[in-house]
Image (cartoon, grey):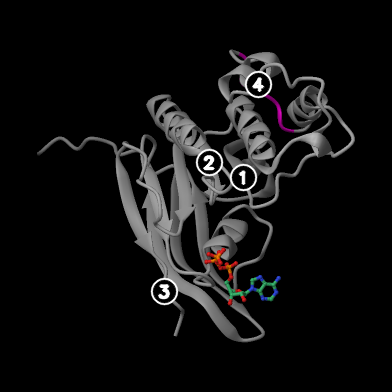
Amino acid sequence: MPSTTPTQPPLLAVHGLSFARNDVPVFGPLDFDVAAGEALLVQGGNGAGKTTLLRVLAGLLRADAGGIAIRGELTTPATRAATLAYLGHLPALKADLTALENLDFLCGLHGRRGSQSPEGAMAVVGLAGHEDTLARQLSAGQKKRLSLARLWLSPAPLWLLDEPYANLDLDGIELVNRMVQSQLRDGGAALVTTHGAYAAPPVRTRLLELGRAA
Ligand SMILES: Nc1ncnc2c1ncn2[C@@H]1O[C@H](COP(=O)(O)OP(=O)(O)OP(=O)(O)O)[C@@H](O)[C@H]1O
């Protein structure tokens, strides 16, 4: 009898996932999976449903149909919290806390990778020297970098990145790509939405093209 190699379920598997607003379809049904070490680039024009898809995956919106499995198990709030880190359009920072206080606060909420410190993450994203700056005094790009520092600290293996390049200069775009590369090298995975204006990170990448749902 031929020997069979047990296959690992993918980090994320999506089956027949669809979402509608007021009975108007936004996307789906979608079927795709994302393995550890892989990036999925979610492309589509304005209004195609990219943000909505990421919000459904993050558990912020409820799908109309279909299933989302993490490592072969249907998701629960607990598995989502342990597995997913979501970087949305808005920076999700506390305006009246300093940059470092924001990271300390978010690490308290979401935990952090043991090998990383908030101060180290500030340096990684190019914000060294801004530790004591209030979040509301940071520029849009600096706020995005602070959100990236939070992501860098997160222990979650699956990143959901909604337009991570927005507001960033060229160096910031390269920073995002380096971060995604590192996350994948460490056995993680990433979903990245983009209008397609920027080069994909140089990693094992597949494409999911969203069009308007019928
Ligand atoms: N809060 C909301 N209430 C009602 N409709 C919404 C809401 N948010 C988004 N939509 C609609 O859902 C559809 C998908 O929007 P979504 O933000 O997911 O698109 P997107 O692909 O991320 O667009 P963009 O590239 O412009 O960010 C659009 O038609 C949009 O008008």
Residue type at mark 4: give it.
Met
Residue bearing mark 2: 159
Q: Residue 104: x and y, percent?
A: 78, 23
Asked if labels 2 and 1 touch by Cβ distance under 8 angstroms, the answer is: yes
Q: Residue 41: x and y, percent?
A: 40, 52
Q: Earlier in the sequence, mark 2 or mark 4?
A: 4
Q: Residue 5: x and y, percent?
A: 22, 35
Residue type at mark 3: give it.
Gly
Residue bearing mark 1: 87
Asked if labels 4 and 2 touch by Cβ distance under 8 angstroms, the answer is: no
Task: State whether residue 41 is above or below residue 52.
Answer: above
Residue type at mark 1: give it.
Leu
For the stretch drawn in magenta, the main secondary structure is loop
- How many residues crowd around disc 1 within 10 Å: few (fewer than 14), some, or many (20 or more)? many
Q: Say which residue appears at 67% left-offset and 32% top-offset.
A: 146
Task: State whether residue 31 is above or below residue 92.
Answer: below
Q: Which residues are the magenta region?
A: 110-114
Q: Earlier in the sequence, mark 1 or mark 3?
A: 1
Residue at mark 2 to residue at mark 4: CA–CA distance = 19 Å
Residue bearing mark 3: 211
Residue at mark 3 to residue at mark 2: CA–CA distance = 22 Å
Residue at mark 1 to residue at mark 2: CA–CA distance = 8 Å
Residue 39 in sight here: yes
Residue type at mark 2: give it.
Trp
Residue bearing mark 4: 122
Residue 72 in sight here: no
- Of the two numbered discs 3 and 2 in the rendering, the one whose residue sits closer to the viewer: 3
Q: Earlier in the sequence, mark 4 or mark 3?
A: 4
Residue at mark 1 to residue at mark 4: CA–CA distance = 17 Å
